[in-house]
Image: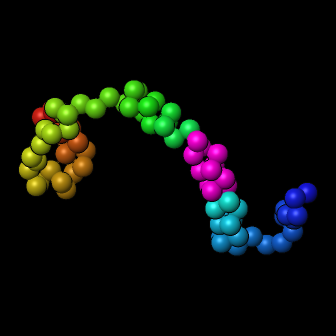
Amino acid sequence: MFGMELMSGAMSPLSDIPQFKNINVSVAFILLPFSKLIEKLAVKYIPENKAEADKTVFLDERLLFSPTFAISECYKKH
């Protein structure tokens, strides 16, 4: 079938790379004609909120040693 023998020998970590590359290139060519539509959908459904994007939060360096507290402080100051 399609000239590929599945499970014909031992698998190496690099044996899947050509197949995944071919799949990714094929999907890219299939979706290429729809790029403008995909862009419009992304702009429509992912709103850009510049007020929140420009907001800078400064954290105490000691919080960086405990990520849980750092994240909770970000939410409090946000």
Q: Is residue 8 visible?
A: yes
Can you give x and y, in whole percent of width and height, for residue 69 in the image? 20, 43
Residue 11 vertical placement versus 66 (above, below): below
Can you give x and y, in whole percent of width and height, for residue 28 in the image? 59, 50
Residue at image position (62%, 50%) is 29
Residue at image position (20%, 34%) is 50
Asked if the magenta segment contains residue 16, the reply would be: no
The front one of 40 and 27 is 40
Name the chief secondary structure element in magenta.
helix
Picture quarter containing residue 62?
Answer: bottom left
Residue at image position (66%, 53%) is 26
The front one of 30 and 9 is 30
Can you give x and y, in whole percent of width and height, for residue 5 in the image? 87, 65
Which residue range is magenta in the image? 23-33
Can you give x and y, in whole percent of width and height, for residue 67 in the image? 24, 49
Q: Is residue 20 visible?
A: no
Give the left or right position of residue 5, taking residue 47 as reference: right
Disc tally is 0
